[in-house]
Image (cartoon, grey):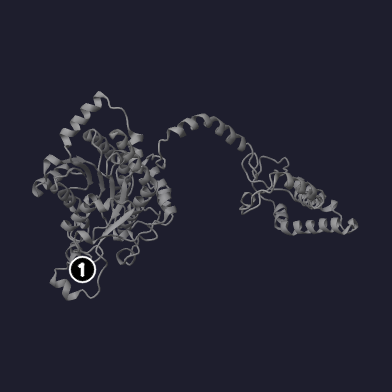
Amino acid sequence: MRVCALILALGVSSVSGFKFMADWKAPTAGDGKKLKDTKERFGDKQLVVVTGASSGLGRKTALALLRTKQYHVVGAVRDLDKMEAVAEIDGFDMENFTPMECELQSFDSVHKFCDNLEEFRLAKPIDRLICNAGIYQPSLDYAKWSMDGHEQTMQANYLSHFLMINRLMEAVSAAPDPRIILVGSVTGNDNTVGGGGVYPIADLHELDGFKAGFENPIAMADGYQFIGAKAYKDSKLCLMMLSNLLHAKYHKQTGIAFSSIYPGCIAESPLFREKRPWFRKYFPVFMKFITGGFVGEEEAGQRLFQVAHDPRCSKSGVYWSWNGGPREGRGAEALEKGGQISGSGGAGGGWDSIFENDQSSKVLDVELASNLFKYSAGITETTWPDPNQVVSPCPTLKVVGAISKAMILREEMKRMTERPGFNADGTPVRVSKAKRAAKVADKVVSGVLRNSVGRVGGFVRRRILGKLPENAIAGTFQEEKPKEEEETATVDMSEDILSITSESKEMFDKETEDIAMIEDAISGAVFSGDSSKTNLKEPIKEDEENMVAQ
């Protein structure tokens, strides 16, 4: 009875229940040892991966996670010596923190990191993947290239995280409350002052740079001239679009909550280490007392930690932000509170100031996001699973499906033997004017017969079979186009068979006029009873000669 109740509970929980059944395998002796080793290594703690854990936002987030004693944190960093020093200074709980080398300027290094992580985690699923690491090179008027020959900002911030998600998504999906969090930015969201009012603006245009392979010397996603600040903003736009697309494609299938966040402008962050000294000195003052968008590293780390920890943030497809928007007339109040006044991304507000922020039309551009995903997969040489809806493993469907599969395939192949409107080579059918005239004549004659003999036959049919339902015959938005293939003549293969001669172009331009003339002529001949007024043979003969000439 208890077993039945358990199965029923799993079935009711839709995605998680069916996913459990789909992934279930009979345990082996080797699995038992692996589970035991996993328990000894991690205990009851959840496993979290944080990229860029040695500085700035990632450093404070890792520390906040460790303080709860509920997580084992893997820090993906490029400099293990620096990470060791930071861990000692900040007092990281090293029993629950594991640094691993991951150089985001190298796809090989990302692959190696994922391999090492797979070995390290044993049977433990990855509960959280936090894609935080990023670089900002706004002062450069030329691009710097990664080990793979891609512009550094875009590879480190976006492409390497794209590859990492691809490698780790399966391990994340096995967790009970799986989340993948991408750190976006107000600069990638152009429906704000920070994103839409300060040049350069994040804009991927038609992704010509990605489409062409995004290899040196192509430095920008849109294929145009390099601007360091725009490269950063474009990378954040890519991350936010990726989060939305992954939600649409894989949330229901995997149960993973995909989200992006903007924790506020961390104006004193090492992110600005490549800016000039005067900027690093005065930019925090400007953000604190003028715009109110400033937030310190500690508070920003708490915000990213919240999205990883707070049960309210298990919702997928969300762009998380804090507070309610910048305030006007800040002056004295800002000075009194050291700049700590609520604003969208600004400091203050606390745990409950989190909200689901609006995203710009660029971020929500589904068609562009689809192309971004396709081109990114090509650049990173990744293969992604087909998005499938999670369905119940219905035993009846399996039995019926096994029996009917061959029959369904046979009927579908039969349907596919004809392609109305296409020639044998797959090109669309173009019908000659001679054939059009014949079809018009046939239509007129058929109309006459339909109004005489056809009416009698229709009356008998309706009396015996009854009328077809209206919804069976209505609903088409276009008439089916003719199936006949165009008559073609032998042509010299040395010539371009796709070229259009001036004579055939003239004939094509007058097509509508000719058809109208033929219809009028036939109608006059049939309904007036006077065939002497129209000679149909001449235009038809002329059409046939034109076709042969072509």
Say left or right for 345 vs 369: left
Q: Looking at the image, can residue 323 be seen?
A: yes
* Residue 245 coordinates in the image, percent (x, y): 38, 50
Q: Which residue is mark 1?
A: 286
Q: Residues within 10 Å of mark 1 (few under 14, many from 20)?
A: some
Q: How many marks?
A: 1
Looking at the image, residue 336 sits to the left or right of residue 430; the answer is left
Q: Name which residue lies at 24% across and 64% down.
A: 323
Q: Nearer the viewer, residue 62 or 163?
A: 62
Residue 282 picture location, percent across and down: 18, 66
Name the residue: 85% across, 55% down: 526
Disc 1 residue type (three-letter): Phe
Residue 192 lies, with reference to residue 401, above or below; the image says below
Image quarter for residue 80?
A: top left
Q: Residue at x 19, y 75 (%)?
A: 331
Say above or below: 453 vs 394.
Answer: below
Splitting the image into 4 quarters, where does residue 419 fall?
A: top right
Along the line of sight, the residue nearer the viewer: 351 or 392: 392
Q: Nearer the viewer, residue 68 or 441?
A: 68
Q: Is residue 148 visible?
A: no
Location of residue 77 in the rendering, given as x and y in whole percent from the top left corner: 20, 44
State the residue lying farthest toward the top.
29
- Image coords of residue 411 (percent x, y): 59, 34
Quick one: SS at disc 1? helix
Location of the N terminus (image quadrant): top left
Res 127 quadrant in image: top left
